[in-house]
Image (spheres, rainbow, N blue to C red):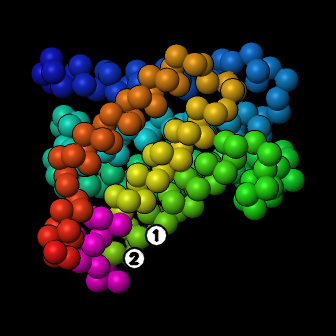
Amino acid sequence: MTLRAGAIWTALILLIGWPLAVAATSPLLAWRGPVYVLAGLAGVAALALLPVQPLLIRGTLPGLGDAAGRRVHRGVGLTLVFLIVVHVAGLWITSPPDVIDALAFRSPTPFAAWGVIAMWSAFAAAALAALRRPLHLKPAIWRAAHTALAAIVVIGTIVHAVLIEGTMGTLSKTVLCGAILAVFAVTLKERRVWVPLLRRWR
């Protein structure tokens, strides 16, 4: 492994591990039950994995070719869906009324609505990926739709996380969210997924 490759992987591991470590050792968890703790950490883990997806699409991560990168991208996507399910299910077990209010967009806490929007967008992105071949979607349409859903996931999740004053440290959360936005924005600029559609509609 080259020095550059080692630096990239080290930075990514620190970016993911830092907020997880801060959340796992938060004093706010001292009096919480194991289900609540698991649900909270699943949410933090999902947020921490978000920058991995655009990095895989860009081919930034050393040692992963195009084929391997696509496989890992799909695997991380499924992991994100699993973590979201664990997060919501855990919160449901600890407080069903709060989850019902959030799903119905009746929650008095603004972060809840953003979390629900991000959740359904993540599920839709995963479903679209699974149905891409059965639906015979054209590559340009598939990329544009999948990217649009991913953008909603990114924005919704970041706003959801920023509005919550919980176990994540302010600094680690700010750095992570900033990294997610930066990587996603650069990927959007490079990929230009909507350009083929705009040219077709002119």
State the image coordinates of residue 163 (x, y, percent, origin top left): 64, 33
Query: Which three-letter amino acid code belongs to the residue tagged 2?
Result: Leu
State the image coordinates of residue 105 (x, y, percent, origin top left): 73, 57
Q: Is residue 79 highlighted in magenta?
A: no
State the extent of the magenta-drawn residues as a range: 133-145
Residue located farthest toward the bottom when viewing the structure as drawn: 135
- Who's the residue at 61% across and 48% down the image? 114
Residue located farthest toward the front when viewing the structure as drawn: 202
Whether 144 is drawn above or below 10: the answer is below
- Who's the residue at 52% across and 38% down the image? 158
- Picture disc at residue 131: 2
Location of residue 137 (image quadrant): bottom left
Q: Is residue 140 highlighted in magenta?
A: yes
Mark 2 residue crowding within 10 angstroms, few (<14) / some (14–19) / many (20+): few
138 sits left or right of 115 in the view: left
- Frontmost residue, 114 versus 167: 114
Q: Secondary structure at mark 2?
A: loop
Whether pointer 2 and pointer 1 mark residues with C-beta atoms closer than 8 Å, the reply is: yes
Q: Is residue 92 visible?
A: no
- Who's the residue at 67% across and 42% down the image? 111
106 sits left or right of 133 in the view: right
The residue under label 1 is 127
